[in-house]
Amino acid sequence: MTIESAIEEMARKARGASSVIAKTGTDAKNKVLLSIADGLYAQTEEILKENGKDVARAKELGLTGAMIDRLTITEETIRSMGEGLTEVSRLADPVGAVGESWIRPNGLQVSRMRIPLGVIGIIYESRPNVTIDAAGLCLKAGNAAILRGGSEAFHSNQALSHIIQQALGTHGLPAETIQVVNVRDRSAVYNLLKQEDCIDLIIPRGGESLIRSVVENSTIPVLKHYKGVCHVYVDEGADPDMASDICFNAKVQRPGVCNALETLLIHSAEAASVLPAIAVRLRKAGVEIRGCPKTMHILPDATPAAESDWPEEFLDLILAVKIVGSMDEAIAHIGRYGSNHTETIVTANYQRARRFLREVDASVVLVNASTRFNDGGQLGLGAEIGISTSKLHAFGPMGVEELTTTKFVVFGDGQIRE
Amino acid sequence: MTIESAIEEMARKARGASSVIAKTGTDAKNKVLLSIADGLYAQTEEILKENGKDVARAKELGLTGAMIDRLTITEETIRSMGEGLTEVSRLADPVGAVGESWIRPNGLQVSRMRIPLGVIGIIYESRPNVTIDAAGLCLKAGNAAILRGGSEAFHSNQALSHIIQQALGTHGLPAETIQVVNVRDRSAVYNLLKQEDCIDLIIPRGGESLIRSVVENSTIPVLKHYKGVCHVYVDEGADPDMASDICFNAKVQRPGVCNALETLLIHSAEAASVLPAIAVRLRKAGVEIRGCPKTMHILPDATPAAESDWPEEFLDLILAVKIVGSMDEAIAHIGRYGSNHTETIVTANYQRARRFLREVDASVVLVNASTRFNDGGQLGLGAEIGISTSKLHAFGPMGVEELTTTKFVVFGDGQIRE
């Protein structure tokens, strides 16, 4: 069988399984989730052994330490995957929920019912825990899924896939509900992206080049997340301690993630009094400051910022700092260099808080809170499958509800159209 | 300037204009809509003259009568475009609406605010009224739009575009908010489909081949509508008169549209008593019946249905009829041959009504009502920009709200992440 026909068959089987899982009740889905967790605990030794093969091969191939770190499964990783599944089992089931209903002049009663999307394809890089997290969220939302992890995690993903399919089988559900593509060849991905008749949505998780390549090659809708160039704007009259706490937390608490702060914008009226104290704290934590010319006056031993620093997602202990003359200048800077991800204002002013919330074009806009709160768990959605920076269907963190859609349901008494 | 760079510049200007229209208040947007309507009435003569050039050229080129009919603008068309704009001006403005809000354990207050999508590209065929309808809906939802009509409507679309841009100018809004691509060359479309940094959504309106070509070539998300293969299932115990009225209305009231009935499924217990009476009514209206073998026993002078009739969107006075042994068989037939568009059950049975609503996978599922109600106006959404048969973002009729998305807005008091 060619790769093309193998992928076609997987997609067709997933479509078939999707109509079974769509009708499966909440209790049955939750039992599968908990069975997968039990399987992970019971087969820890087997998982670690298979993961060991991948890690050994990665070392032979000379992959970076960071990549090997992301690839490695420990007992702790397994516990965390199991706990994640338990958490997802406790989330409300979105499927079948009916929202507001209205009556038309002719008596038709109209409402929308939440339904699964159908079949979701997920394409990701080395972290094998995505296999479990994604399978759990897709199942909870009543979807079938085709998962394609990185080829470097081949054996790990096979072992995890085996546990998922065992749990599905135990509860009488089709094994094809969750399938893992076990083909190392990259052409498998391109074939997957053309199965628009059987796959409803593609979610790529990984670096920008992976995502761009998926977008360019897919005839299936893609929910994408490019990068997070997040700003904090410290407004005129902002509380200096609050500004310092929020900047420090947003930059330092976990600098390698998409909702970390990259550029601090500070109103010129506050710069001289606020910047030096913030800079001391940041430098103690090892943060390099790259400042605009006005910042260099206040912090002469900072590094001068280059134009290329403003649109940069550092993902590191580096902070660009720019002094602005007004909130309008801050909003214009964000419009030009931001990535529609997460933007915070620190302010005590009612009108400007309201205006910032309305006018800044980002998936999450905050007043007086750290950018690090752009996260499905933190915002109360439960687990998340990613953060969308494109606007269609979902903008911001995507929880289990974002893996569903709605159809119209209409109750009549024999109405016909005039 | 090459076509490529001309399209790139249009897209860039649309992106710029989108941030102005996104912030424009409801009153100002409504004034523009009404000014466009006034412009249409005032410049009727000019529009008819320009449209006449297109119609003359279409006749020279030997286009079909149906195509020339769709292309032709009359005083009646102009009145209907103007009334459509007035209607859209009366719809509630979705932009800025904030839904449910919730408090996190740390005190953060989280909610979602409705915002425009940004820039919408609309690609359509000969009907020039789409230029006005689409511009109106995009404007009301706070979006910029780039419209690309059929080259056969070149002069008509130029005249309409002129009126739209005059109205925008009168109210101090950028003319680039609504742009009409005035390039006949097809490559303009392909260039448009690659402007993913400046265009957020593509909506193609037209035949299946246009839509497939857009999907294959676009790196921008596409909201698509393939075809409507709609069914009515007459259940065991259904009221025969209601069944007859609904079938007749769904098939005959306007057979050339996507929500018209194409296949009637009827329970075997009712076929002998219900089918002959329905057939008489349908035949009087000129409907050709293509029946399954069991139908042929009851209606011996019907045409035997071929396998190719079941997935067919006739868009004509033709009805396929199949007798089924159970609702499950009807649902399976719909699953196999339907197009996820509109499905109706005629029934008096509570459980089966509920199960049909839940289990049938279509954008609109109805009990005891004509399929013809799958329409934004009929379902209470106001005007519609199309009917989506793909599930992402919108499934079913798309009104002004479907031309928006939501962002998260978060109110804090200095919260940082632990």
Image (cartoon, coloured by chain):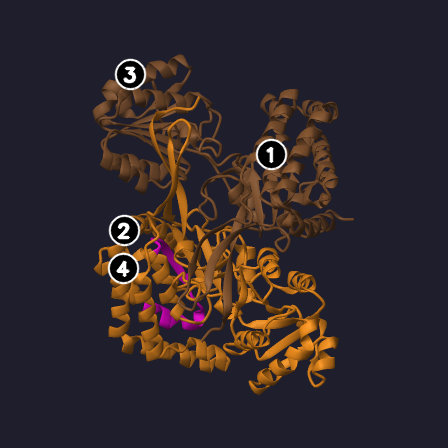
Chain colours: A brown, B orange
Q: How far is disc 2 from disc 1 in space, using C-alphas?
A: 42 Å
- Front position in the image: A388 or A217: A388
Find residue B182 and report its horizontal and vertical position in percent.
Answer: 38, 64
Q: Which residues are magenta?
A: B141-160
Q: Secondary structure at mark 3?
A: helix
Which residue in the protein does label 1 denote?
Answer: A133
Q: Nearer the viewer, mark 2 or mark 1?
A: 1
User: Mark 3 against mark 2, which lies toward the viewer?
Assistant: 2
Q: Which residue is mark 2?
A: B24
Dot 3 amino acid type? Pro
Label 3–label 1 contact, CB within 8 A? no
Marks 2 and 1 in Cβ contact (< 8 Å): no
Q: Quadrant of residue A158?
A: top right
The tag earlier along the polypeptide, 4 or 2, is 2
Q: Which mark is residue A276?
A: 3
Closer to viewer: mark 4 or mark 3: 4
Q: Which corner quadrant holds the C terminus of chain B?
A: top left
Q: Amino acid at mark 1?
A: Asp
- Answer yes or no: do the residues labelled 3 and 2 have beta carbons within 8 Å? no
The one of A87 and B163 positioned closer to us in this rendering: A87
> Which residue has dot 4 on it?
B30
Q: Chain of mark 3?
A: A
Q: Residue at x 61, y 42 (%)?
A: A26
Residue B371 falls left or right of residue B90: right
Question: Is disc 1 placed on a helix, strand or loop?
Answer: helix
Neighbour tally class for label 1: few under 14, some 14-19, many 20 plus, Cα within 10 Å: some
Q: Position of residue B10 (x, y in %)?
A: 37, 55
Residue A116, position as x, y percentages in the image: 57, 49
Query: Marks 3 and 2, how far apart in space?
Result: 39 Å
Going by the numbered disc 2, the residue's amino acid type is Thr
